[in-house]
Amino acid sequence: MTIRETNRAGVIPLRPLPAPPGPAPSREPLWRDLVGEVLRRERRSQGRTLKDVAAAARISTPYLSEVERGRKEASSEVLAAAAQALGLTLADLLALAGGELVRLSAARPRSTGRHGHPGRAGRP
């Protein structure tokens, strides 16, 4: 049975259908990616190592690495500790990530939904 036949039969396939040819649609940036990028950028701008910042924040080096790469959704406590280790407040960290979200969102093409509102396609 092919993947398409499986889908018609109402069975969820283990593998997603291949993407259609052409450019991939842009996706909304993920918050964890934005926060991780800000943490990494701030750490590097201070010339500090992952090990140093992780020790100051009292979190493991591998975990901080995962957070910086957007692989883990860190709790507010972990984010506050990492921010403090970098001389920032949690509010500073979130404001920087929010600014990055605004910048990236402004660069994305916006779709209009049924009611002419940007980004609300398919919602009443």
Image: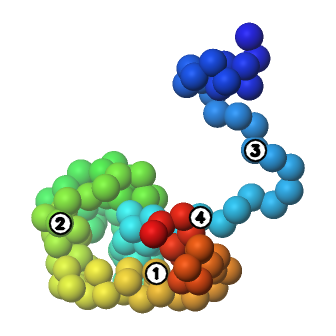
Please report whichever mark, 4 or 2, sits nearer to the chain's N-terminal start.
4
Look at the numbered discs 4 and 2 and tell me whether their residues touch, using CB distance below 8 Å.
no
At label 4, the amino acid type is Arg
Q: CA distance from mark 1 to mark 3?
A: 26 Å
Q: What secondary structure is marked by label 2?
A: helix
Please report whichever mark, 4 or 1, sits nearer to the chain's N-terminal start.
4
Mark 4 or 2, closer to the camera: 4
| Residue 22, position as x, y percentages in the image | 86, 56
At label 2, the amino acid type is Ser
Please report whichever mark, 2 or 3, sits nearer to the chain's N-terminal start.
3
Mark 3 surroundings within 10 Å by alpha-carbon count, few (fewer than 14), some (14 through 19), many (20 or more): few
Residue ID for mark 3 = 19
Residue ID for mark 1 = 101
Mark 2 surroundings within 10 Å by alpha-carbon count, few (fewer than 14), some (14 through 19), many (20 or more): few
What label sits on residue 76 in the rendered view?
A: 2
Q: What secondary structure is marked by label 4?
A: loop
Residue ID for mark 4 = 27
Q: CA distance from mark 3 to mark 4?
A: 14 Å
Q: CA distance from mark 4 to mark 2?
A: 25 Å
Q: Which of the pair 46/103 is nearer the observer?
A: 103
Q: CA distance from mark 2 to mark 1?
A: 18 Å
Q: Residue furthest right?
A: 21
Mark 2 or 3, closer to the camera: 3
Please report whichever mark, 1 or 3, sits nearer to the chain's N-terminal start.
3
Please report whichever mark, 3 or 4, sits nearer to the chain's N-terminal start.
3
Mark 1 or 3, closer to the camera: 3
At label 3, the amino acid type is Ala
- Give the residue displayed 38% in from the left and 83% down from the top: 98
Q: Which of the pair 90/40 is nearer the observer?
A: 90
Q: Is residue 30 above or below residue 117?
A: above
- Left/right placement of residue 7 relative to residue 49 reads right
